[in-house]
Image (spheres, grey):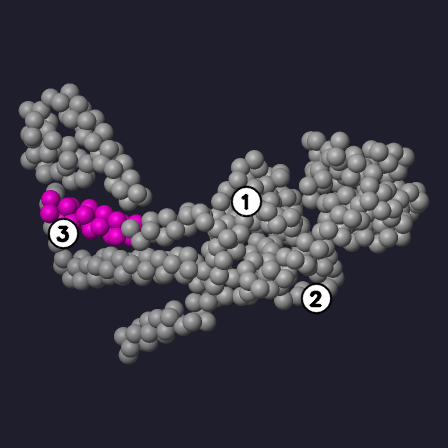
Amino acid sequence: MWKTVKSVLAAFFGVQREAQRREDFTSGKPISFILVGILMGIILVLILIVVAMTAAG
Amino acid sequence: MRKRHVWMTAGMLLAALSSHTLAAEWNMPIGVTDVSREIYSLHMTIFWICVVIGVVVFGAMFYSLFRYRRSKGAEAAHFHEHTMVEVIWTAVPLLILVGMAIPATATLKKMYDASEADLDVMITGQQWRWHYSYLGEDVEFTSNLGTPREQITGDGERSEHYLLEVDEPLVLPVGKKVRLLLTSDDVIHSWWVPDLAVKQDAVPSFVNENWVRINEPGIYRGQCAELCGKDHAFMPVVVEAVEPEAFEAWLAERKAAAEAEASGVDREWALDELMERGEQVYGSICASCHQPDGSGLPPSFPALAGNQALMDDSALHIDTVVNGVAGTAMPAFSTTLNPVELAAVITYERNAWGNDTGEAIQPADIAEMMAE
Ligand SMILES: [Cu+2]
């Protein structure tokens, strides 16, 4: 689980180590990356909303 | 020898870039409001950041091209990834962008805060002029192009402020917060005055907000910045910023003039009076399409001289000018002109260029018709 989160974070940033990429593509399940990705996308949007509201407030 | 030449050229270029005259001619103006100054300093900050990035990136690139060229036996290194370098080249631009966004957002917030204004001015774009209305003060007028026709057609020498001059400028007090409410009667226009750092679209049936607090008295010129039809280039903006006392005096004078004009509606006007006034109005409002001699530009803009259909039917003529003709380029002038001006210009059209109907259209009749 934590490994999946780290891989999704690396994808958000746009940089990933080749060794980690290989491991994700051999041992990981696609569905877990998709679900964690969607969830973390929502969290990112919520964080941006809170930042914008405090900046404007 | 060659090296020194390169350095000299570079030095001259830098000196030219930093010289004030060149900056004033090619750069954006610093302007005369606090917001315009902030925008200018943001612009310069970001400009120099871009210069530094450009020098570093292209410097590294050209240095590598030169230092490791093939003729000197350079061999390419073969490797696939380097996580640390990739992290750095992602993180550095991110930090630069966020660093630029923070001050830019602070300025944007100021620009959008049009609250607590001392004065409200409604600005309405019309093809092809600006209409200014001082809300709550009963003062409104239309600001037309002031450049004489012969300069445009090439028959006269161009004046200093060619196409950037109007018959009546927008007069504003310095040191006061003025809220600008922008809209349009016909198509999208854009009210743009670089020295005030205002460029705001005027959109039909929307009201956009902006504001200015001018620091220095002076005359500031701008243009319509949204392509809006045939005379887009001929609807400049001129703002005259004056001291608050001078502004109050001007406002009182305009109010008195408006009252005198309003009382003029009730009285009976003589044909000569109407003709004189009508000629003025025709020159500033109608002549750009229907031409000074009434010959028009058919088929879009019909001739008025010898227009039998209109001359036979004064009611049709009045309706055409007051309400416009839907589906054609003829707009309704009921919002641009007052009853006296409407009566005068219609009278002028019915008696000029051989249209000798001898009819005087009375302002009172127009006012009555518009009230219905
Ligand atoms: Cu326009």
Residue B368 vertical position relative to residue B174 in the rendered view, above or below:
above
Q: Tell me the subunit letter for badge 1.
A: B
Mark 2 and mark 3 lie on one chain; the one further toward the N terminus is 3
Which residue sits at x=26%, y=57%? B53
**Residue A35 seen in the figure:** yes
| Image mark for residue B157 | 2
The magenta segment: B83-101
Which residue sits at x=28%, y=44%? A55
Q: Quadrant of residue B220?
A: bottom right
Write down the residue under mark 3: B76
Q: Position of residue B13 (x, y in %)?
A: 37, 71
| Image mark for residue B182 | 1
Where's the C terminus of chain B, which quadrant?
top right
Where's the N terminus of chain B, which quadrant?
bottom left
Q: Position of residue B78 (x, y in %)?
A: 11, 47
Q: Nearer the viewer, residue B7 or A13?
A: A13
**Label 1, label 2: how far apart the Cα atoms are:** 34 Å
Residue B309 vertical position relative to residue B146 in the rendered view, above or below:
above
Mark 3 and mark 1 lie on one chain; the one further toward the N terminus is 3
Amino acid at the residue labelled 3: Ala
Which residue sits at x=18%, y=24%? A34
